[in-house]
Amino acid sequence: MMHGRPWFRVLALVLGFAFLYVPIISLVVFSFNESRLVTVWGGFSTKWYGALIQNQQILDAAWLSLKVAAVSATLAVVLGTFAGMILARFGPFRGRTLLSGMTTAPLVMPEVITGLSLLLLFVTLEQLIGWPAGRGMTTIIIAHVTFAMAFVTVVVQSRLAQIDESLEEAAQDLGARPAKVFFLITLPIIFPALLSGWLLAVTLSLDDLVIASFVAGPGSSTLPMVVFSKVRLGVSPDINALATIFVTIVSIGVVIAGIAMSRQQKLRDRDAQMALAANQQMIESLKKG
């Protein structure tokens, strides 16, 4: 029935993309609005970008969010890679079910529960050992690593499950140590998954509001917290300008990541074709011999 109605699929596709991207496009357009009212067009102007640059509160919050996102995403990739390697390569072992459950629990745990539990943990640790001394950037990074690591683990584990283990076994048969096998064989293969996991962790960190609200202290408000506090009083055009800048940065990052992964895939396909051609030549030479 669907094959006889191609217009229906096209219409569904157009409506789906419109639902996703029309609000973003309207936000970008109204960031160049002359009027202070974000719903009334008053002419083209870039003055709100100038006002945004002079807003020290938003700049400080944005800088803090970027630092937290970069550090937490990097730590999440490191820890998530170790967890994914253990779950994908070590086979059955005692505590595997517990480890798998602990790494995937943040995926389904409500953010309110996660934020409250981390807040209680930090308060208890401060009372017992004096660390962390108050709540700020450190506690936000720990909190973001906690839930971002789960997403990275799933991505890395699924990628490792698709890799032919004979490549790693062949390298070990040739005398390579496990660490060398990982850095020279496994790591280049799973690099696109690591890059995807890092970008996903950065996005989750920049988007988090609930958990950061629990673990952040005075003077450590992230950008979503500042934006949320301003939106409750009414959306101002400088917020649209800020959102436009982030949309641009994210779009550029997605394009760069797509190009990098495409090049990596082409290199892997070329290496696979060269290896196949070499094997065929070897088989033909053995037959002639």
Image: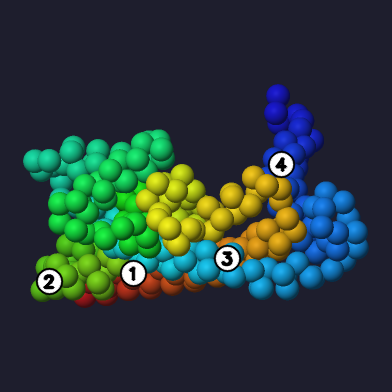
**Viewer-nearest of discs 1 and 4:** 4
Q: Are marks 3 and 4 in contact (CB under 8 Å)?
A: no
Secondary structure at numbered mark 3: helix
Q: Say which of 38 and 22 sits in front.
A: 38
Which residue is found at the position 53% from the left and 53% from the top?
225
Residue bearing mark 1:
188
Disc 2 crowd, CA 10 A, few/some/many (<14, 14-19, 20+) = few
Q: Are marks 1 and 2 in contact (CB under 8 Å)?
A: no
Disc 4 crowd, CA 10 A, few/some/many (<14, 14-19, 20+) = few
Judge from the rendering whether residue 39 lies leftward or rightward of residue 173; answer left or right: right
Residue bearing mark 3:
57
Distance of label 4 from label 2 (alpha carbons) = 52 Å
The first of marks 3 and 1 along the sequence is 3
The tag on residue 17 is none
The amino acid pointed to by label 3 is: Gln
The first of marks 3 and 2 along the sequence is 3
